[in-house]
Amino acid sequence: MLSKADKEIVPIFSGGGTRLSCYIGILQALLDMGFRFRHLVGVSGGSIVAALYAAGWSLTDIKALALQTDFKQFWSFSFTSLLRTGGLCNGNKLETWLDKQLQGVTFAELPHDLHILATDINGGGPVVFNRLLTPTLKVSKAIRFSMSIPLFFSFQAFENHIMTDGVILSEDALHHDWSGCGIPLICFRLKSDAEAQPVRTSRYFPLVSYIYMLIRTFMSAVSREYVHAEHWHNTIVINTGAVSSVDFAMSQQQKQQLFNTGYETAMSIVPLKLGALFTAV
């Protein structure tokens, strides 16, 4: 059992897409409970929050950025892009925006150790980006790799890999000794409910609407995958209700609610999950 003074953990933010404000609430709760971390692990939308924090942003500024940013600016569609690159949207606007927020920082330049995971569709295995393996790679590029939602954002190549969203990785890829010295892990996953949505098809481009519904259904199904018993003790699943990972039109109120949900769930569940490891948690 570790003492209160040794309350260091490695938070893993697995998936989430546009629901990143939920992870901001989780981070706030962890800090309020006195936890500290030198290593952060991010996948898909979770990698955005992990990267901003690892780059030295305050949670106040990260939250303000999430609430004030209109995610719709990152979404567009092109049938040419779909046919040539496997995604309706090339994702360039998202990557440019991320690089601006992160000021072009590379993994080697980060004050914290950040680990971002994507999936290689040419084999299905994990591809890890961090200070050790990709020191000169821009963090924004790694996030873009990890955010390659199938059919939504274009696939991108890296070395001999073809990148897609990291959220479809197996649990074993996440539960790795990221610190190299056995610092406890705590993995946060976001789950969305399967709820019927009003069907709004475009008069001129109905295929786009159908593809969007397919992506939403697929990503929601992935989020509801069961947690293996081996990892249940350090995994927390947070229900985000009807909000899915591809809701680019979220209001500030919805984002604030996600922040509250993340904060409240972490405050109530983390002590139960980690109480056996830390005294006075």
Image: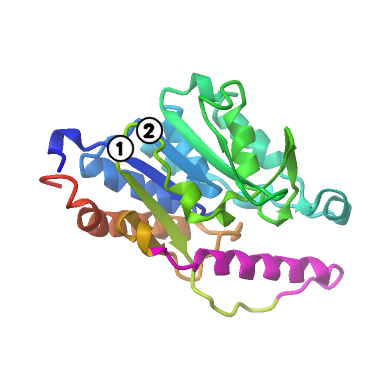
Marker count (numbered): 2
Residue 81 showing in the rendered view: yes
Q: Marks 1 and 2: in contact by CB < 8 Å?
A: yes
Residue at the disc numbered 1: 183
Instruction: Please rate how many residues cluster around mark 1, counting C-alpha atoms within 10 Å: few if below 14, some from 14 to 19, many from 20.
Output: some
Q: Specify the segment rendered in magenta.
A: 200-228
Residue visible at 46% across and 56% down?
255
Q: Which mark is residue 179?
A: 2
Residue visible at 66% across and 49% down?
148
Say which quarter of the image contains residue 113. top left
Classified by dominant secondary structure, the portion drawn in magenta counts as: helix
Across and down, in percent, residue 139 comes to 57, 30
The amino acid type, in three-letter code, at marker 2 is: Ser
Across and down, in percent, residue 276 comes to 17, 52
Q: Is residue 127 left or right of residue 85?
A: left
Q: Is residue 201 magenta?
A: yes
Q: Is residue 95 left or right of residue 278?
A: right
Q: Is residue 10 left or right of residue 105?
A: left
Residue situated in front as seen by the camera: 71 or 44: 44
